[in-house]
Image (cartoon, coloured by chain):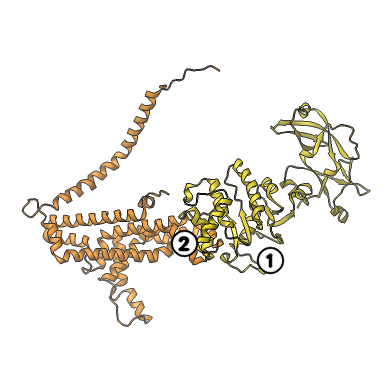
Amino acid sequence: MHQEPRDNQLNVEPLRAQEVREQWKLLSLASPALLVIVAIILIPVTWLFYLSFVGGDGQFSLEHYRKMIEYKSYSRTFITTFKVSILTTLICILIGYPLAYFLALLPQRLAGLFMLAVLLPFWTSLLVRTYAWLVLLQRKGILNDFAMQIGLWDSPVKLVHNMTGTLIGMAHIMLPFLVLPLYSAMKKIERDMMHAASNLGASPTYAFWKVYFPLSLSGLVAGSLIVFVLCLGFYVTPAVLGGGRVVMVSTQITAILENQFNWGAASALGVVLLLATLLILYLASRLFKLDAVLFGKD
Amino acid sequence: MYALDDVDLEVFSGEFLTLLGPSGSGKTTLLMAIAGFNRPDSGSIRFGDTEMILTPPHKRDVGMVFQSYALFPHMTVAENIGFPLKLRKVNSAETAERVTEALATVQLTGLGDRKIDQLSGGQRQRVALARAFVFRPRILLMDEPLSALDKKLREQMQIELKQLHRQLGVTTVYVTHDQREALTMSDRIAIINHGKLAQVDTPQAIYNRPSNSFVADFIGESTILPLTLDTQERLLFEEQLVLDHLPEAFSKDNSRDWSLVVRPERISLNADSQRSENDCLVFRGEVKEFVYQGETALALVKVGKDYDISVRLGTNAASSQTMMKPGDEVNLSLSRDDVIVIPQEKTP
């Protein structure tokens, strides 16, 4: 065989140039999306941040943040926001976990059908769904009529324009956000896992808590976080179904802007909400190894 | 049409029994029924004299190695193996001791703290095995446990599993579709086809005395040739070779048609004429194809009107003189002791 002299530099330059070209091409493909993110997220958020530190006299001041600590209404708003978000998330977990479990056990075709039932409301307008709940839950609404007819209660119960109505509406709207990641995590659990557990002597209950639940936990955490974070900034449903009695941060921001036209105060609220959300995501990531949860790393 | 029908099988205490069959034959269904993962429409599964058919899987005390291993990814190796012990309320000192012992048995000493995803395929296989026998189950089930391993490792594990079985003495039911694996490992093989038992016997008996054409064809290589019955009730091949050494079944039922099963390696080509025709059946044939395959060579020989018989030949220096080419005329001889006669499959 003919022996070529070994050349470590053979085609080094063009190969290197090709790699660089490909990386630039990739970057250019991603650039429209990156530009949009910068234009509609980074710049406005920075602007908000800046506004929150500008006082009524146009000078740098911390007055908006000071007011937030001084006035009770602000802290009440934050407490309400977190209460609604936590309760909604809990309701979604209680309803969503068994639902996702049921879907994961069904044969593919049936599961698709049921999933459609979960997703169909998801694809209709948020506003329509919220007002639909208003119709269902009001004093002389279908639910009250029905409950009184079958004798569940005697006089109409206040189901809307309060915390109850807000939670019912929010839980309904948020449910798919919990079920979808949970279902996909459950689908990845091999059937043999539960067989193995029971084969080794685990009762169905023990096998569920020691094997199935830990393996579905990543999906549950991902879904719960999505629901919780979405709830924190939610506006339409609490505004309509809360009837002014459930004041969330988003509701208060609108009020401040509409009544006082105070951009600084509104911005400060937004900034605090954003920071609180980031803090929660950070804590959750320390607790649950979020990388694995959100990016599917094993 | 049932997945399993009329299956009556007894597994002896301490034996290694293999359920062998093509995919979809029902062998895994039978294994799952023993473990309790599926519910038969009717039937009886007894461990000793105890009826188990209504017992839920977690109370059956059966160890199982799954095809996918089904190791718990959120637990370490030691936690996986300790899982059945914890459920049996074994105290932690004894659990640790038995886990260490089980790890040593499967040659994984020192890997107890590893996570499952830090193990190679072969190591996972061993952990699954250790977890299945550590609690001393009444019976050990294995569902194609070696199918995910590469050929070399698989053959090594076959020997190891056999040794382990001898060491533990646990009654084992093993499922595979690989006939070589079944022949290598088993005390007895139960061949399943279309949900029915085709034959249950030792590897030697199954290979040397298949009782029907499915078994003859499924185990090893074989050429199946039709036989005819003459007026004296003798079996003939191509109206010239008279066969004796007939199976017992033949005398009972000579109204059926019969076939001759020829194993490729049991035929010799151009054997010395010293061996008398009393000991051997001798055919004339013409070589159609000759292929060299390394450890053996394969000759396809045309015999009689239009039957092709495969013949395997050794490839050592002496026999390589017998290299032949298409068109060569040859003598095929088959020892009468190697004659296999089976009832012909009724064509529906």
- Tell me whether circle 2 and circle 1 mark residues in contact (CB < 8 Å): no
Which residue lies under the disc numbered 1? B48
Look at label 2 and name its amino acid: Lys
Q: Left or right: where does residue B279 sit relative to residue A47? A: right
Residue B143, placed above or below residue B33: above
**How many other residues sit within 10 Å of disc 2, few (<14), some (14-19) or many (≥20)?**
some
Image mark for residue B228: none
Residue closest to the eye, A114 or B35: B35
Instruction: Name the spot of residue B320 as percent of width and height, x first.
Output: 76, 28
Residue B28, placed above or below residue A29: below
User: Which quarter of the picture shows residue B32?
Assistant: bottom right
Instruction: Name the spot of residue A62 as percent of width and height, x first.
Output: 11, 55
Q: Is residue B202 visible?
A: yes
Disc 2 secondary structure class: helix
Q: Is residue A103 visible?
A: no
Residue closest to the eye, A201 or B291: A201
Residue closest to the eye, B34 or B307: B34
Q: Left or right: where does residue B6 sit relative to residue B239? A: left
Which residue lies under the disc numbered 2? A210
Q: Are marks 2 and 1 on the same chain?
A: no
Instruction: Name the spot of residue B197 as percent of width and height, x first.
Output: 72, 56
- Colour of chain B in the rendered structure image: yellow
Q: Left or right: where does residue A79 sit relative to residue B59? A: left
What residue is at 35 percent from the left and 66 percent from the top? Answer: A91
In the image, the chain rendered in orange is: A
Instruction: Name the spot of residue B274 as percent of width and height, x first.
Output: 90, 33
Quick one: quadrant of the N terminus of chain B?
Answer: bottom right
